[in-house]
Image (cartoon, rainbow, N blue to C red):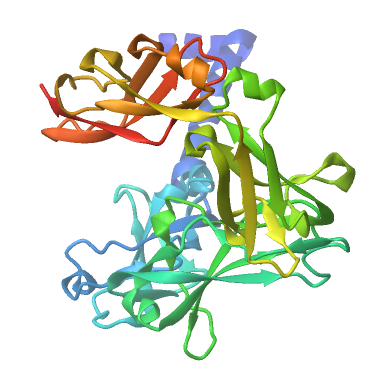
Amino acid sequence: MKRLAKFAHRLIYDNKLLMIVSLAVSVFVWLFVTILLSPTDTVTLRSVPVEIDLANSVPAQFGLEVFGQRDFTVDVEITGKRYVIGSLASDSKAVKVVAQTQYVDSAGKSRLELKATKARESDEFEIVSLSSDVIEVYFDTYVEKDFPLTVKLDAPDGVTKDGYITSDPVLSEKIVNVSGPATEVNSIVSVEARVELEKPLTQTKTFDAEMVALNENGGVAHYLTFNKDNSVVTLTVPIYLVTEKPTSVTFKNAPLSYHAAPLHYTVTPSSLKAGVQGIEDEDELDSLTVATIDFAELQPGVNSFDIPVSSLTGVKVISDVQTIHVTVSVPNCTTATQKLSESSVSFVNAPEGYEVGSIVSGIESVTLVGPYDSLRAVTAQDIVVTVDLTDADADAAQQTFRAEVSLKDINDCWVSGSYTVTVAKK
């Protein structure tokens, strides 16, 4: 009894001890009120994801998949002790929301009821409501088909400015693969590659095209994937500057002497009105090159070539001409034949693992063109035969390759014609 009285006296008159006891009592009272007498509160969990699990579901047994939107969220209102739900206010994973698919047995849009449960059974709160009790989901079977592409170029102010012309746009792909719900894919009658021009063009330009699939009513098919999202279809709009220039030809594989003194040629017509790609000012161009003549195509005398205007690259002829006629004169020259041996042939760029075994069919002789005195001085050692094996097929027993035949250190003669070599793989 004396001890108790002594402790009470000390508690009353010892400020430090009194402070400790008061703090302990305060904590105890706070815990009692918070845990046992805490008021309930309500909070809203924002953007809780909706699960659409098709594994072993009724739709899956009918071969149905979800197309279009499948990432849904809802807000979930929960209630519980303030000290419990206060820590859950920003935890969207505290609640699990699942779309009910057990009644989906056919293609089309379905309204799926949502069921919300606690993600952890030990959590002490109740689910009050959802911002939406249903979602609308499109179900169908998967199918894919190939369709030809058509061009839809929308140019409100015209495709080109004055002084320029265009030709048919060029697609990077002529066929597009379309995949998606069977109902939509089977309704497609055409697929357009669409490009809209903001202003007229003065240079050739390439655009990423928008793919649009149309059904028989002219409507747009939905929920589709084009080329399985692996590639972009581009649309190139060719633009040509209109000009009228003299016509000309160039030469390739010319001996050194003919670089300084080119062969005489004529072109009919001698001038053309045409659109030309790649230039912004017609003064940049002295003439229209209508052909590149390989010296291997030339023989002594007059050589004639007919060039279809449709074969010209980067040039769109406006003049009423279908064929361009070119003559090239090769004066003071003759021909000679020179025999070769297999040792004259060299092989380059062989793929790894490919080795030439033997020459099945080689080049016995070549035709040379040049001045008579120069040809008499040419020997087999002056002739170089090179076979490029870049495209060799490692599985082929034998293949035929184009051979490049040329003269070394001979300035006024050339090899006429084309040649091939057939080789067997080792």
- Which residue is located at x 39 percent, y 57 percent? 228
Q: Which of 98 and 353 is in front in this view?
A: 353
Please give left or right for residue 393 compared with residue 405 in the image. Answer: left
Q: Position of residue 404 (x, y in %)?
A: 39, 26
Q: Is residue 261 visible?
A: yes
Quadrant housing the C terminus: top left
- Which residue is located at x 42 percent, y 64 percent? 176
Q: Which of 45 and 253 is in front in this view?
A: 253
Please give left or right for residue 97 compared with residue 62 in the image. Answer: right
Height in image: 315 above or below 322?
above
Height in image: 282 above or below 112?
above
Height in image: 217 above or below 130?
below
Please give left or right for residue 63 compared with residue 426 in the image. Answer: right
Q: Is residue 1 visible?
A: no
Q: How many labels does the image show?
A: 0
Height in image: 358 above or below 126?
above
Q: Which of 390 and 289 is in front in this view?
A: 289
Q: Which of 18 and 325 is in front in this view?
A: 325
- Which residue is located at x 60 percent, y 41 percent? 292
Quadrant housing the N terminus: top left
Q: Position of residue 193 (x, y in %)?
A: 56, 67
Q: Position of residue 195 (x, y in %)?
A: 65, 64
- Which residue is located at x 84 percent, y 55 percent? 243
Q: Where is residue 322 in the image (x, y as percent from the top left)?
A: 63, 66
